[in-house]
Image (spheres, rainbow, N blue to C red):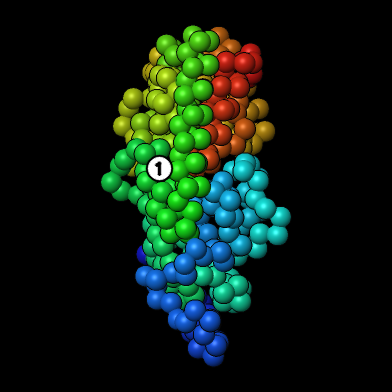
Amino acid sequence: MSIRAVPSRRALLLGAAGAAMAGWPLLAAGPRTPDAPARDPSRIVSMDFGLTETLIEMGRPPLAVPNPASWTQWVVEPALPAGTVNLGTDREPNLELLAALRPDLIVTTPYLDGIEPLLRRFAPTRRFSIYAPPKGDAYARSIIATRALAAAIGAVSAGEDLVGRAQATMEAARARLTAAGLNERPLLVVNFLDDRHVRVYGAGSLFGDVMERTGLVNGWTRPVNYWGFATVGIEALAEIPAGRLIYMEPVSPDTLERLAASPLWNTLSFVRAGRIDRLPPVLMFGMLPSAMRFARQLQSRLAEAPSHG
């Protein structure tokens, strides 16, 4: 996802912020170019939740992120440190605040390509690509991005530790799920968009990659976009021989109420058999920390607890 047009209001703010920046004294280390961030930067601004969770797990949390109030709705863990500055929205960050923060590194993704030149006016900016064309393996790309991010902030050892912990989490979940005999029946993982449509995760999505690494069979083998999911009507699920369905929070109560009253929903085989599980939120566009959270949730719900509809 990327932005190709920047509102004129931002252009005006950029001019004002640039004028303000021109009057600042240089830092003791001297001026930096976009390609020369400070050694071991500590004042990091993250424009992406996946990068943010990775920084936190490496012990280098950012000082500011866009829309931190939504963290508990979409990410949950690791916890966002108290005092993390609210930078506004990702597409229209608060430029005056960004200037005042004086970051020595900004990290971003292709989703915000349209404002990357703007961000570079405030600090050296690094771009990390996971969920962008061409289609690929989100988990493998997360490993690459984790190592690159760790190198950029002078935390190579912490990055390798995170990669190792993620691998250990996948292996532990695989062993537990296999021992429980859950590696044979196809499983669907979805988000409800409303009572008639779902986002279903296939190969290449972070959820699909975790399922593969934990030995589960992904029931969705049909085409997906380069993010690894397809948006389909509920009726499409009737054509898939899945033994179980997992749906991810958040989901609105009225959606669940309408589904409960839906004749179509109630004809689905996994609904009739009561093989439906609800999982707490996991960031669909996350990195290794989200992959670890999803693996733990799968293990906890499928191997250690009965089904919940």
Q: Residue furthest front?
A: 157
Mark 1 secondary-structure assignment: helix
Residue 266 position in % (x across, y down): 55, 16
Query: Which is nearer the eye, 66 or 85?
Result: 85
- Which residue is found at the position 34% from the left and 25% from the top? 221
Residue assigned mark 1: 143
Compared to residue 56, the image places residue 42 above or below, namely: below
- Which residue is found at the position 43% from the left and 59% from the top? 152
- Which residue is found at the position 47% from the left and 67% from the top? 39
- Which residue is found at the position 64% from the left and 16% from the top? 305
Q: What is the quadrant of residue 167 in the picture?
A: top left
Residue 224 position in % (x across, y down): 34, 35
**Residue 102 seen in render:** yes
Compared to residue 168, the image places residue 183 above or below, namely: above
Amino acid type at image mark 1: Ile
Residue 200 position in % (x across, y down): 44, 31
Q: Is residue 149 left or right of residue 306?
A: left
Compared to residue 100, the image places residue 195 above or below, namely: above
Query: Which is nearer the eye, 65 or 281?
Result: 65
Label 1 Cα crowd, 10 Å radius (few <14 / some 14-19 / many 20+): many
Query: Which is nearer the eye, 132 or 137?
Result: 137
**Residue 233 seen in render:** no
Residue 279 position in % (x across, y down): 60, 28
**Quarter of the image that includes the C terminus:** top right
Q: Residue furthest bottom?
A: 23
Q: Residue furthest right?
A: 82
